[in-house]
Image (cartoon, grey):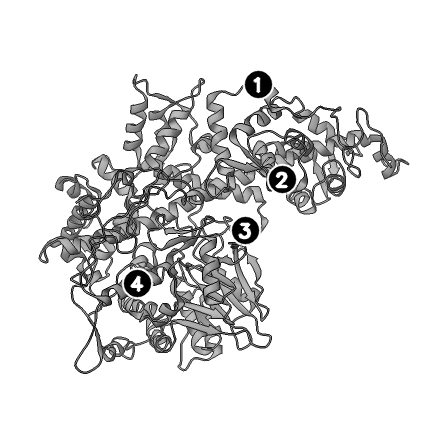
Amino acid sequence: MAPKKKEEPKPVAPVAPPEPARPNTPEFDPTSVTLEFTPEQIEDFKDSFQLFDRTPANEMKITYAQCGDLIRALGQNPTNAEIMHVLGKPKPEDMQTKMLDFDQFLPIHQHICKSKNRGTYEDFVEGLRVFDKEGNGSVMGAELRHVLATLGEKMREDEVEQLMQNQEDPNGCINYEAFVKYIMGS
Amino acid sequence: MGCGVTKSNQFNKHSGKAIRAAVLIQRWYRQYVARTEMRRRYTWHIFQSIEYSGEQAQIKLYNFLGYLMDNFTPSSNERNLISHIFRENEVCRDAEWERYFCYKNIEVPEIYSGPHLFFPLTVEQAVGLVEAFRNKKQLHSRYVLQLLAETWKLFRMMPNINRISTCQSKEITICGDLHGQLEDLLLIFYKNGMPSLEKPYLFNGDFVDRGKDSIEILIILFSFMLVYPSEVYLNRGNHEDHIVNLRYGFTKEVLTKYKLHGKRILKLLQKIFSWLPLATVIDQKVLVLHGGISDTTDLGVLTRVDRHNYVSALRPPKKRHISSTGTSIDSDDDVWGKSFQRRASLIYPKPLGTRDSFHSRSLQDFSDRIKGNSEDDLEVRRRRQSVFINRSTEKETTLTVSTESVSSDNAKEEWKQILDLLWSDPMSQDGCVPNEVRGGGCYWGPDVTEDFLNRHNLQLIIRSHECKQEGYEFCHNRKVLTLFSASNYYDVGSNRGAYVKLGPDLVPYMIQYQATSMTRELTVRQRVGRTERSALKVLREQLFAHKSDLICAFKKLDSNNTGLVSLNEWATAVESVMHLGLPWRMMRGQLVTCKTSDGTVDYNEWFNELAIKGPNTDHIDQSLLETLYRHRSTLETIFRIVDTDNSGFITIEDFRQTWKLLSVYLKMEITDEAISDLSVTIDRNKDGSIDIDEFMEAFRLTDKKSRLERGRSMFMGTAPDLTKLDEEPNI
């Protein structure tokens, strides 16, 4: 029942839901990345990196699993697929065990920062408009929940709940421009 | 559009778009979660740093006072001011105690509308007390004293370590720190039911301090214990200690609620606290105690100690003499005399001297006989998680122990056992090191847990003592469970509370809750936002209180005297003064709003931006004022010590003396004139005495921006001071 996609390569994993645009990319090579951060920015990243460091001896290392969260905490919003890509497509069991130090982290972060595929407010609103059946500026909360849990990089039920908490009006509708402002305003 | 297009068709048609849209939302959501988690984490750090700083400050103060006792001549003014807290209760013999407990001459007036108690207590009365307190009634002091007398009798019969069993299908409910938060206890009873023959309970210490209903909690717990002595158990916590209570609010609460008999109630509670059992073992397999263990903890020793000798865990035990009549008398002598040389660190030979060592003056005194080393002056503080690393440069100091025998060694050993039990915290690294963040007890590692459990043939340690966001947390391969039952501890929405149910299978089952209904309606982001604002407010007050040192640090970096520093320099300077190990750069956005366009900070302007306002104090010396803000809590504690009759007032002369004491402690110049200015401000009715509460209120910092209600948060009450680390008196 694979729906049509435009520039989709073959699905990466056998039963994976279709993922949006990323043409066949070669493996990520950290050495090919030129760092363009200012020294001030690097100090900032160090602070945050340290906050994530849970090693008992404070070795300035984080696990692969934390990498995505750190990049997001610093203001980027990559997809999970992009994260896996820059980490070199690690196996699931590696996520909790393999570690990154700060120098290894920087090129990864730089690469994500340079990505043009950020998503603006307009993209977002456009995206939600897809679900606006009546063209009246609102979407059905229930439908949105369904979509978020079944399409794309699926969210868990509790994650969906957290996102949508207090967003629906008494009729179960969400004004999506307000919703987008809310999400982006974190 | 709904016009003949089915749902699945619609998806097919827009599926590419739909998926892209979904992914976009999901990406943003994941970013939002990560950022929220980050904020929550550093907010937690702020509160925890400040909390532990306060505890540390308390121990330092206590040590300082002890030092004064040792070193000032008996007739000196300063010594007289404080000697009474080191003197054990004058009433020594047990028989005399009974008389002191006597409540019979206290009349209960007709207009009293609170509960009446008739002994022996029944369960209806205990339940009635819960209801009465829910309805904000207060128990009359006569009944309080009567209750305490009965409680004391019961505790005296208990061993140091209670051994209980979950026989048949009885599950035992275990609760952690309550800290005077009655709402949480009521919530636990509501969810879980009150104690009964079928419903045994164990309360794991820290019933008092910080929250505003500590005495009510004690009354309820004691009542249920009297009604069901085999089903309700209490362990002692580090806050069941009158020295700690002086700072953290319990003393004040009792004196405020019981103006006439408060002092007596407090004295009796001192006694009762010392009789609280130290630990409980369930089915010989699960150990429940308040703080934790160390690598020397020995249940055998703990079983044998005379626990009631340790009225405060912060003090070495008193000498006990056996009188000729065979009854034991508590020695009233100078406790610090021969048998206990406090000239060297009593517990730990030495401060940790690494770059990571937090300020390393735990239960040490300041005598110049201690061999300091340069690392003592290193004032780098790591964040809590990373305090315990790298012991490589640890050195030994000479321990000048008294030449008096075994008995004093034994006493010391026993004292350490109890101290460790009440104050220790687990760490993730192996080993066992002094807990210098708090100033007492140890940090112990997974290897110590493993060894301890094996030695004593146990399988699990349940402890409390640390606030956890989810109300509980496992560590050490799930062999140690931390349980905390005071929800919203740092602020509304900061954390949940939890209690544990343990059945015969000894598998702990956790139930979480959060007291204020308000928080249920808040989203996660709103809750995090609230707590964050609260933490930042406290932080801004502290920054303001360190203004002169901060300006000094900024000036050092601003060699051209431009009044500007870069953002990086700002962060470095702030950490060098505040020593909180916080991620200043990350919080920069909320703390600095006056950046210039090229990313520099006008540091003078910044203090205005902090929007903290002091009282109208133009005539008062600025540095004195700053001292006041910074050391509020310490100052208030000293006042309460000096106020020997617990009236809430001290004389101008004592006020002066107190400041002199503080100036020695802080190594500051405080002129008589400056003190006079202060006292004049506050002795409005010119009757020669000062109302302590009024004084502290008058010099509170207020946040111009804040619209937060003054809730139960301890940070909104007495602003805790961050005693500067380099202000050890080097006398």
Q: Alpha-carbon neighbours of circle 3 within 10 Å: few (<14), some, or many (≥20)? A: few
Residue at mark 3: chain:
B
Q: Where is B657 relative to B545, above or below?
A: below
The one of B190 and B98 positioned closer to us in this rendering: B98
Task: For mark 4, give the secondary structure.
Answer: helix
Instruction: Give the CA distance from mark 1 to mark 3.
Output: 50 Å
Q: Do the residues labelled 1 and 3 touch (CB within 8 Å)?
A: no
- Where residue B243 appears, x then y in whole percent? 29, 59
Residue displayed at 39% across by 76% down: B158
Instruction: Give the CA distance from mark 3 to mark 4.
Output: 48 Å
Instruction: Give the CA distance from mark 2 to mark 4.
Output: 46 Å
**Residues at discs 2 and 4 both on one chain:** no
Q: Mark 2 sits on what residue?
A: A95
Q: What residue type is labelled 4?
A: Glu
Residue at mark 1: chain:
A
Q: Which of marks 3 and 4 is nearer the N terminus?
A: 4
Task: For mark 2, give the secondary structure.
Answer: loop
Q: Do the residues labelled 2 and 4 touch (CB within 8 Å)?
A: no
Q: Alpha-carbon neighbours of circle 1 within 10 Å: few (<14), some, or many (≥20)? A: few
Q: Residue furthest right?
A: B4
Q: In this view, does B686 lie to the left or right of B534?
A: left
Q: Alpha-carbon neighbours of circle 2 within 10 Å: few (<14), some, or many (≥20)? A: some
**Residues at discs 2 and 1 both on one chain:** yes
Residue displayed at 48% across by 78% down: B123
